[in-house]
Amino acid sequence: MVTANSPQPALEVCLAIYRLHPRGGLEDNCLRIADELQSRGHRVTILVAGDAPALPINVVHLPDASARRSNHKRVQSFAEQAAKTIANGRFDRSVAFQTMPGFDFLFLADKFRNSPQTPWWKRITPRFRTYAKLEAECFSPESRTRLIGLSASQMDPFRRRYSLDPARVQIAPPTLSPLKLKSGGLHEKDGLALRRGLGIPPENEVWLTLALAPKTKGLDRNIEALARSKDCHLLIGGLGAADKGSRPIIKLAKRLNVESRIHWMGFLSGETLFSAMAASDVLAHPARTEVTGAVILEAMINGLPVVATSNCGFAHYIVDAKAGVTIDEPFDVEAYKTALQKVCTNREYYSENGIVFGKSAGLFDGINTVCDWIETGN
């Protein structure tokens, strides 16, 4: 049955994603798209490799995708099996969430891989060749796959490399969930309680960073800036001190004598994330590369100012909203430290700007827009 929200007849829609667990940003977007399509009366099937959580959606596991040793071989096998599954004509629409040829749409969260500037020794590796081949097949002029990008800066290298027909490319609005906005705003008492629990004096500055991938998110850059900033503390969300990925950071922090001012928060979501935001003066996000950086918007709309590198896909929103400061590459730790100090000193100004911007910028429209494109097929 088609709901009143959908003028389209009921469609059979196939979504293909390599994994659904753990649930990161890409997985979350896939499931939210599936939920929205089902709410519009369409029938959704999700193709996955490996395990997946129990869901009120038809999930089909492709066993051949997990039968290879190396990750790139598993991805290649998954792409081959997924292409065979959609080739029988059963589905009216098909959407890939990794670079895989043969689909109607590619929801692109990946960064550009097949760069001519990549060193020759890296280009001859099986891993690079596998991903480059999948990418080229998706983006070639012969491909009919429509490309859904998440930021204009993300798509620029793809346009140059593959001379993309502009008609094939669409940039989705941000896909923020309304659940990322704290109802009634952040509560100061929650922030003060967290600070007391961590032993942070109320007059000290607190930086928050979310760094599940420490190298990519520039966690070491935050440690270096912290070493140059007296009486500042760093909350690290996404990792615990016992996690394997934390070891190089702990070693660096000990060498720079700042380990006592670092607080490992582990995974943060929902109210725990809001409490961490309330306890903080700034989101410190010096990522080395970032297709979008949804955490930037999540912080801004809740009144937490942001300092981020300008190569993040969503960094321009910081400038548009006057909700923080962006830092250009090549990265300079002293300039970064100065930007953090500036934002913390003027926190109220940047905070209010972010809240106002979040109420007027259409930051929550992405999922509905993508589903409109899938429904109409263009």
Image: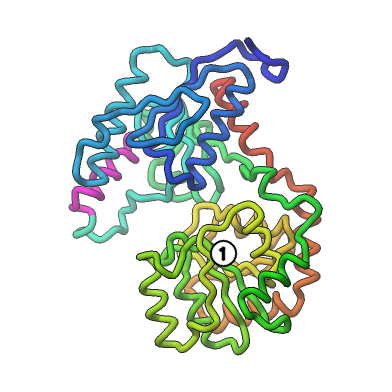
Q: Residue at x 61, y 35 (%)?
A: 367
Residue 55 x/y as whole percent? 49, 30
Q: Magenta stretch containing residue 136, yes or no?
A: yes
In the rendered structure, which amino acid carries the disc numbered 1? Ser
From the viewer's perspective, tell me whether residue 56 is left or right of residue 1: left
Q: Which residue is mark 1?
A: 310
Residue 236 x/y as whole percent? 53, 68
Q: Residue at x 79, y 49 (%)?
A: 359
Q: Is residue 378 above or below residue 130?
A: above
Q: Residue at x 43, y 39 (%)?
A: 20
Q: Is residue 8 above or below residue 25?
A: above
Residue 231 x/y as whole percent? 62, 87
Q: Which residues are magenta?
A: 123-137
Place residue 309 in its image quadrant: bottom right
Q: Residue at x 54, y 28 (%)?
A: 34
Majority secondary structure of magenta residues: helix
